[in-house]
Image (cartoon, coloured by chain):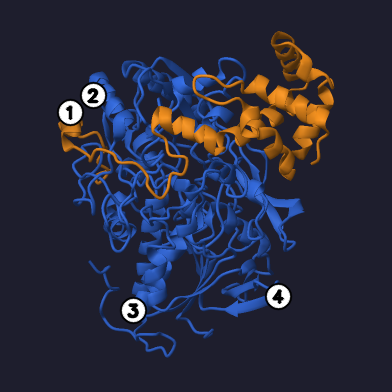
Chain colours: A blue, B orange
Amino acid sequence: MDDTADSILIIGAGASGAAAAWRLAAAGFSVTCLEQGFWRDQTSSAQRFEDWEIVRGGPDHWSPNFRSNLEDYPVNDADTPIKPVMWNGVGGSTMKWGAQFPRFRPSDFKTRSLDGVAEDWPFDYFDLERYYDINDEIMGVSGLAGDPGNPPRKKRPMPPLPLGAGGERMAKAFDRLGWHWWVSDVAITSETYRGRGACNHCGPCDMGCPRLSRASADITYWPLAIAAGVKLITGARVFEITTGSDGRATGAAYFDEGGKARRIEAGTVIMAANGCGTPRLMLLSKSGKHPNGLANGSGLVGKRLMHHPTGLVSAVFPEPMENYAGAFGCSLLCQEFYETRPEHDFVRGYQMQLLRSEAPLTMVLGGYLPRMAWGAGHHDEFLAAFGRTASLTVTTEDLPEETNYIDLDPDLKDSSGIPAPRFHYKVSDNTKRMIDHGIARATEAFMEAGASFTRSQSILPYTGFHLLGTACMGADPDRSVVDGDCRAHECDNLFIIDGSVFVTAAALNPTPTIQAIALRTADRIIAARRERHTASASTRMGWTAERAPEPAQ
Amino acid sequence: MTLTALESQALDALLDTLLPGGSGFPPASAVGIGGWLAARGEHAQALRAILALLPSDFAAFDPSRKEALVKAIETDHPRDFEAFVAAAYAGYYTSLPVLDVIEAATGYHARPQPFGYALEPFDASIVAVPAKSPRSWRDTQSA
């Protein structure tokens, strides 16, 4: 790889790494991405077979601790009630997600100014708006513009997915209660889109999508990025971000697919290994200029870990609804209690996201409902519940606390001998009060909708999908790791573009915002390069005064 | 895992106590769940643990005595019992005969792909009420 300022190394091929790789390569940079996992063929996903639920509970579990694939690294999650879940490979955790695709709201970027808690972001919703738009086109969003609960946005690339019987029932219940709801923006095709098939509503999106309807970074950004010249190296397990005597990043050291240690050099390094993988690597990358870990003079790398603590209310309805049909996590959301209200005993708020019914084995094992009782009544109980359930998440905004953090486990290591991450996390009292409120409201909504039974769960354990805040953004180098352009304060050629940089968490699925930030950061890098007005032999296309190209329609 | 004849009988009797059949569903033994469990190494520990708790003549017990014993195992050995129940449910609810019953009763497909399901297209009239709501996002451009 060319050792010039225009060579860029990205660590991680997930949602943010893919977006930045495309944007930078399309502008003329020479981009290489290292990914410890591999490509996965979604057309051979397990839901073509009758034992797919067993696969989901074992080798394709959301948690790396259950999967234990070679490319996974273990996570010490003993000291957290919310277990981190993630997937290592091309596409990252978008290979396992449900594709609910909301934008943050403007207030999510201004919690200090508006509500007196946490800090404001260095930029706001309106700075990200055009990047949300670009991202929506590339990922392929189905939804409906016109929601008064959010700033106006362009017509969605595709119309909404069907709500199904459960969604329509809850929509009408919310209307009767006077609570605001709207159709979810989802990264799932409702019609054929850029060569991807329309969703056929099979249900388990998290198992991968054989029709390529559910977006993931491997089938959206990566083809564009590779066409633009990005070199993607899989099976590359990075164990250190290397730095020079001046403390600037020089590249990375990694084990290749055969286990051989290699080094790669770059002029700019971009971390995109998620809110766990990124701080882990930074803490592993100590040096003379970075004695506490890479760019960790503030001591905040790994700290201010935020999740989306999630409660759940599940309901059974007396009538058959066939509510197993449809994308399991995508129909509508209620943001009635999203903003801070003086009458609440908590600050900030939550969303309620409607979930569909579970598949048979998942239901009887006790997911949304208790484990189904054995014995004489078992089969009637099954028939009375199956396909007749719905659930509402209570997805809360977690506020940053330095006592919630990730560090390196002194004993646990991955298969390459690299120290594993260790989580330390407690749910705050504010969050607990918020969840209690949300459970009461969700229960009220289900009773309004005619449910015959409800069951609530306060903190779901395997909901650590959103790993945020562990290398936060800010203007003060003593109180943040990166600046408003996601450039590390202490290492001017190091950028971080994943959820690590989040100042606050909002109460919404973060991937669209992560990707928008990645695109914005890429444009900042491009703009800085353009201002230098120097030619470079390492760029593929050469430099012009043009902006990076918009996605083709 | 190889089972003796007595063990197989006891296992089938236990499985039929958990999943007796009815309402169109077959009993667990009729769909070979015992053999399925014995053939899968990941369930060997759960299987051995539960078989060790069953008397060899369990299959000859009358139904109420079987149920009482199973409840006692559930109370006194919860971890082993839950592991076994999970394994039994896994075998039962991924067996094609059972999935066929579920499909006939509810329309659910044993294999979600390749056919999926037909759903009525989205009808925008459903948002008539929320579309008229006042703005509820806080404008931060002056904050």
**Secondary structure beneath disc 1?**
helix
Q: Residues within 10 Å of mark 2 (few under 14, many from 20)?
A: some
Q: Check contact, mark 1 vs mark 3: CB within 8 A.
A: no
**Secondary structure beneath disc 2?**
helix
Label 2 and label 1 in one chain? no
Amino acid at circle 4: Lys
Quarter occupied by residue A133: bottom left
Mark before the other along the chain sequence, 3 or 2: 2
Chain of residue at mark 4: A
Say if B13 sits above or below A40 in the image: above
For label 2, the residue is: A175
Chain of residue at mark 2: A
Chain of residue at mark 1: B
C-alpha span from label 2 to label 4: 60 Å
Q: Position of residue A528 (x, y in %)?
A: 37, 74
For label 3, the residue is: A530
For label 1, the residue is: B129
Task: Give A123 or A74, whichever is nearer the viewer.
Answer: A74
Q: Position of residue B77 (x, y in %)?
A: 77, 22
Q: Position of residue A244 (x, y in %)?
A: 62, 77
C-alpha span from label 1 to label 3: 49 Å
Residue pictured at 34% horizontal, 41% vertical: B117
For label 4, the residue is: A260
C-alpha span from label 2 to label 1: 7 Å
Residue pictured at 43% horizontal, 46% vertical: A205
Q: Check contact, mark 2 vs mark 1: CB within 8 A.
A: yes
